[in-house]
Image (cartoon, coloured by chain):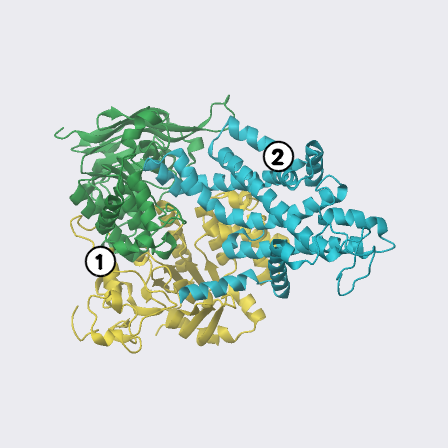
Amino acid sequence: MMEKLIEVKNLKTSFFSLGGEVKAVNDVSFHVNKGEIVAIVGESGCGKSVTQMSVMRLIQSPPGKILSGEVLFEGRDLLKLSTKEMRLFRGSQIAMIFQEPMTSLNPVYTIGNQVSEVIRTHFKCSRKEAWDIGVKALRDVDIPEPELRMRNYPFEMSGGMRQRVLIAIAVACNSKLIIADEPTTALDVTTQAQVMDLLLNIVKTKGKSMIVVTHNLGLVTRYAERIYVMYAGRIVESGTTRDILLNAKHPYTKGLLKSVPDLYEDKDVALIPIKGSPPSLANLPDGCAFAPRCDYKCEMCLTGKAPELVQVGDNEHYSACLRNGKEEF
Amino acid sequence: MIDKMKLKKNLRVLFGRGVLSVICGIYVVLFIFIAIFAPLLSRYTPTEFCGSKFLSPCAEFLFGTDALGRDVFSRIMYGARISFVASLLSSAIGLVMGTTLGLIAGYFKGFVSMVIMRFTDAILSIPALILSMVLALLFKEGGILSVGFVIGFTLMSSYTRVVYGLVLGMKENDYIVAAKLVGQSKTAIIFKHFLPNCFPSLIVMFTMTLGNAISLESSLSFLGVGITPPTPAWGSMVSEGYKYLVMKPSLAILPGLFVLLTVVAFNVVGDGVRDVLDPRLKGKL
Amino acid sequence: MPEKPLLEVVDLKKHFPIGNKKEGRAVKAVDGVSFSINEGKTFGLVGESGCGKTTTGKCILRIHTPTAGQIIYDGADIATMDDRELSPIRREIQLIFQDPYGSLDPRQSIGSILKEAISADHKRHSKIEINERIRELLEMVELSFEMKDRYPHELSGGQRQRLGIARALACKPRLIVCDEPVSALDVSIQAQIINLFRTLQQKLGLTYLFIAHDLAVVKHIADDIGVMYLGTLVEKMNASVFHERPLHPYTQALLSAVPTTNYDVERKRTRIVLDGEVPSPVHAPSGCPFHPRCRYATAKCREEKPQLRRIADNHDVACHYVFENLNKGGC
């Protein structure tokens, strides 16, 4: 039996504005086992990033609020920690890597300053020691000439290099879990491959776990063991990468797979787009949120509560669709 | 339904600064009302000798009378009118001239742009009061038109600066490229794209320069180079009253106080207008 | 040559001078690019950021004036034309932008955006004509006529891009340069727009220059593909063989780095991970621009810049050792 590193149960986060309640995360549960890479996939505005921000307790309040749920990290509920405990927890246990590395690094300090600063908040050590740990961490993430690079400012580095610096901070602090939120979206294809390979390498060699949040299903095909697909604030399907890609059950996942052009597909295979556009989280339809765009909807889909996740296969394959199993799509 | 909500939200933003902004809003409305209807509201004309000199406030003369026996209350109401007209006129002159120059300088690169912007920089480097004093001395007329022009010229350069900056920023926008690609002419691009997109900033600046213009006009009148007595400008009232500062301080203090209140009120309202029209401009104008 | 190409780009160069003029330093954004597109076809230009693909597009649109080279559009060289000579051709070449929002004036309604594009041809149009044309254009991009009074901020990303396409179509173009037209859109919307491009091409016989960094998208829509690296075309080939027979080492690496949802392929294939990063075009390397990162590079690559050579039917590669690579096989 795999040991769970982090387990999120029934998390609900909403934002309150003049327009009403925006249900960004709506009853989301997921877990990550030790040593596992899990992907959370969804389009922009589906709540995937807010979910991770809630786990880190980085939701701005107001307007945001974590309404209910549990975030169990090695059995401790992070939502019950004091603000100070949580601050120490971030970075040391969970590290987060963002899409735009420029904004997560302070432009007026050198890389070395920032890296050793983080190290010193989590370990009791001298400036010199922290600096050395930093140099070693930069070397670990394959940054050439780490001693020189420590004296650079963020703007003197390329996007790929900055992303490596953030990964280096995670490595130096010995975080058990890395949450990578669209880690390569701002990067070029070949740099993207470098950074993803580096992340994979670090997770595997140092026994860490990772959550990759992305809109690009293809990106995680290679790396993730399991995938959660999110739509309109909910998880609509989850399962092993193989099950999701080859045996998707939820109409949204299926639609997503058919609508993305693939290099290894024949040109004449027409793309089948998903109709319409994603609903606004402030104004969700009754019933299944995907129903208005779904080709397989029935009347039951349009009323009542959103469908629950039900098991549709072995290996923890779940899908939240009323017609799961009742009729082949 | 949506419009109602939007209106509510805008009002909330407009008066978002609390009591102060509400008071200033009411004050500005009142000021404009008095400026327009001064002849109907006041009992006497501003130049009429209607009572004994230096009367204290009473039911007939709310603010008393001045050294020549004129009703101070009526004079202040007419003064509001002068201030309002002068500031409106000068801000409008500044707006039109400044925007034109800014659009030209922003759109056409090279020599023309350089000349306009250097000229603007030169004007901006001279303190507004000194510049308008010099200009006013050149004009010598002391009518509301010439004062309006003098102040308008002084205000012009700040409009030029802002419009120039806006146009430079907009030039990089894809929609300008798109307009060129569909074959739109230069003038059409200026009037259809650049100008309308400058409007929010211009409206905000206009409200704010109204206040500035009032203080400039009052300063000029106080120094005796603005609107010439006996026309009841607040500035000249202060300068007349100030001779009797010990004997009857209200003669100088009252018009001075109104200048202060009006300038502050216009600035606060301007801030509110800015937040409604373009929240991104916060702290920039 | 069975057909005459609508657009032929010959040895196009665009250098942006930097520093003071005496030094004569320049960023060689585009440095000798040649390709041609036949009427009704799509040419895909791919490459990573800074490779010069967008600059190439802007030269063809004559937003930039090229430093050297020819751009032969419909038989005439437009590279050196001045504004007056260009004006009759202007409307025939249109651009679809990456950021659909930035390309729409926020203060114009949809109707007036289209009206502007329709009436900018300096001909007389009656009100009814314009309205009819707006209706026709909106229908073409699958938007409803009722939307004409709305403003861009009220539209979704996909609808904005459709509007951008409608504006381009308003000029009755023959060639459309699409600069990353779907990369700013949501995944589920991208397919809608790609399909729209294909339908419009069939209906109106449009010619596309499709610029994108997403190889899968380009492969899906293009007939021929050119791969750019540091301002030069390193490989040019038919889209159908794109993923099967990449011959330039850079194309191979690029392809192997593209993520795919094809589970079996992805788990089996080996990935070529390149060292280092794309050098800045200010300090472009001598010889072959790719040699510092190339695993096959030799002394010859450092000194001599390889030219595009035809090595098979409709397949050009700029590599000294292309035949050796051929034997080693692709990825």
Q: Measure how far apart labels 2 and 1 are at the Cα level.
A: 60 Å
Above or below: residue A326 compared with residue A258: below
Q: Which mark is residue A258?
A: 1
Find disc 2 in the rendering and name its residue.
B121
Helix, strand or loop status at disc 1 = helix
From the top left corner, tell me how far across and down residue C209 is, in percent.
Answer: 26, 38
Rendered location of residue B153, percent (x, y): 61, 37
In the displayed structure image, the side of residue C6 where residue A110 appears, left or right: right
Q: Is residue A92 visible?
A: no
Q: Looking at this view, is B201 or C252 the one in front?
A: B201
Three-letter code for the amino acid on which mark 1 is drawn: Lys
Q: Position of residue A169 (x, y in %)?
A: 51, 56
Rendered-image quadrant of the C terminus of chain A? bottom left
Depth check: C239 or C183 in front? Answer: C183
Mark 1, Cα crowd under 10 Å, few <14 / some 14-19 / many 20+, is some
Chain appearing in green on the rendered image: C
Q: For the point 30% across and 45% down, which residue is it?
A: C114
* Secondary element at image label 2: helix
Residue A281's mark?
none
Chain B appears what colour?
cyan
